[in-house]
Amino acid sequence: MLTILLIASVQQPGFVIDGQVNAETVIEAPAEELWAMWTTPEGLSFFAPGARVDLAPLGRYEIIMLPDAPEGEQGSDGAILLALEAGRMLSFLWRSPPSLPETRAYYTHVTLRFEPVDETHTRVTLVNDGYGTGPGWAEAETYFERAWPYVLDRMRTVAEGQTDAD
């Protein structure tokens, strides 16, 4: 908890924890396989064309959506891992995309949990919180209310070996 409070305190004035976005899916794959999809650059290819991951608390966790964009506008530039429990939980800071400049300078918080349902299925839950109340925050929250379910659906599609046409 100290880490989160310290990070929040160095952000620009006006950072207020308010809203929360939730997404969940059940995927026909073991938790360890789905964990690898979020913790390696190769695994994260379902999400974006690049990633910089240092798998340790306070390690780098940058998902690169726009590799040709200038530094600082490529994706989750500057994001870090906060906590992890191998195969079960991953927590990291997250940023709005460059298309939402009013909230881009701030970080929100994402926690992913991987819970085995049975021998062949895993429930993946994602909670994204830390949305503020000032200018641009409603747009950011609305953006991620659409984006996170899409990301989890894309993860399911890739993990289950389906194609986008299936």
Image (tube, helix red, strand yellow):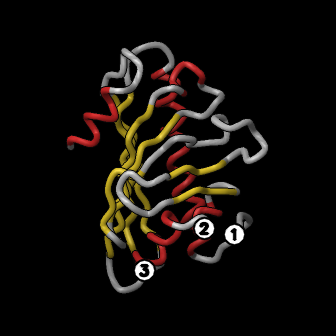
Sequence order check, earlier mark of 2 and 1: 2
Q: Is residue 12 left or right of residue 144?
A: left
Say whether marks 2 and 1 touch (CB < 8 Å).
Answer: yes
Residue where numbered disc 3 is placed: 30
Q: Position of residue 57 (x, y in %)?
A: 35, 56
Residue where numbered disc 2 is placed: 157
**On the rendered image, what quadrant is the C terminus found in?**
bottom right
Mark 3, Cα crowd under 10 Å, few <14 / some 14-19 / many 20+, is many
- Tell me the kind of residue under disc 2: Thr
Sequence order check, earlier mark of 3 and 2: 3
Please determine whether, in this image, residue 16 is positioned above or below residue 142. above
Q: Position of residue 34 (x, y in %)?
A: 47, 71
Where disc 2 sits, the SS reads: helix
Sequence order check, earlier mark of 3 and 1: 3
- Tell me the kind of residue under disc 1: Asp
Q: Is residue 56 left or right of residue 164?
A: left
